[in-house]
Image: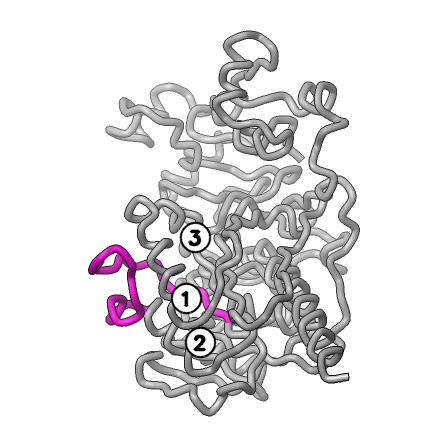
Amino acid sequence: MSDYLSLSEVSELIGKSKETLRRWDREGKLTAVREPISNYRVYRKTEVQQLFGGFLKKEIVETESNYVLPENEYSVLELFAGAGGLAIGMEQAGLKCVALNEIDKWACQTLRNNRPEWDVLEGDIKSFDFSKYHNKVDVVTGGFPCQAFSYIGKKLGLNDARGTLFYEFARVIKEVNPPICIGENVRGLLNHENGRTLEGMKSILDEIGYNVVPIQILKAINYKVPQKRERLILVGIRKDIKVKYEYPKPYRKIYNLVDALKKGSLYKTDVPGSDGAKYPQRKKEIIDMVPPKGYWRDLPIETQKEYMGGSFYLGGGKTGMARRIGWDEPCLTLTCSPAQKQTERCHPDETRPFTVREYARIQTFPDNWKFEGSIAQQYKLIGNAVPINLGKEIGYSIVKFLNDYYSFLNMQTI
């Protein structure tokens, strides 16, 4: 685990605003330092724990397990299913997948080959009618793409969002009428169009009969995923339901790259061998000089200028460039390609990108989950996925909600 905490992390841990922390820094009450790799201003974890150990959020310190056993057979309909990251997580949490919709043919082949019993609906979501599932599915999930809306008046309605994939997500929810729906997206949705896109989504769900639970950003590293990935979670509860939904509690233990690729508490064996991308010769020669947990600033100055080109003279840390991951840290967020110059993810010991199976491990896919298509397609499928362990913890939170809901219903009928 890193010895440093970011401004956001300290703010979240001790319940103080970022502005208060900046003021304390100026006043010398809690001093920020320069982190060796990123050169960003951060806080020493030992100092934060020493000063505020008694005030840290208890759920982060004390959470042991979010596991809960389903008291009934619960079903899930998944939209924009991709290669199955969220679906596997839901399955592991005890939810039965009744159908999945996905437009990408390689993702659909992946889903069918790994789970022949799943009903994979391949094609554009616009061409499917889901009304046969009306009142027969407990949860609709989907990682809908983030798209801007056309705003008409002050309150956005379902028809105003026509032509967007969120419209289709909401249309299916309206057709199916599940007790709960879960949408997931990138953190950037929070501020997309100055927050208006998210507000529009909330007003659409309100129109079709769902109350939106306060939005949360879940950090994958808090849910047994060895990767610094964040996902925005949008939860809608049908308005006739008074049972409260609670997000999965974060865990204290953080898993690192070594936990993903080596035998240990996450996996019973070392990562299996597989194909992977390779660096061009000159790029390999340059990244050979970067130490584990290092990046372009660790190169000799003339090599920095050669590798960075015009970017060398621009501001910003650009900490993803020529970045080699260390064994004792979580991996940075995986992208759809392992060797993009702006978001380099180099193996700690060998000068190469992570292989397909290493990519899958970092996303906590099971080793027996096979991906279809070219190497580039496989990287894309994995990079776009919800980490399985994060999906499983969200699944447990859904099971707990459904247990409470159906228990409440049963009491009403007695």
Q: Which residues are magenta?
A: 141-165
Residue 197 picture quarter: bottom left
Q: Which mark is residue 152?
A: none
Q: In terms of sequence position, does the residue under pointer 2 or pointer 3 come before the other?
A: 2
Q: Residues within 10 Å of mark 2 (few under 14, many from 20)?
A: many
The residue that appears at 77% across and 71% down in the rendered structure is 69
Looking at the image, the residue that sits furthest to the top is 27
- Verify CB contact (< 8 Å) between mark 2 and mark 3: no
Cα separation between marks 2 and 1:
9 Å
- Verify CB contact (< 8 Å) between mark 3 and mark 1: no
Number of marks in the image? 3
Residue 158 picture quarter: bottom left
Q: In terms of sequence position, does the residue under pointer 2 or pointer 1 come before the other?
A: 2
By secondary structure, the bulk of the magenta-drawn segment is best described as: loop
Horizontal relation, residue 292 to residue 151: left or right: right
Horizontal and vertical percent position of residue 380: 42, 62
Q: Nearer the viewer, residue 349 or 312?
A: 312
The residue that appears at 77% across and 52% down in the rendered structure is 264
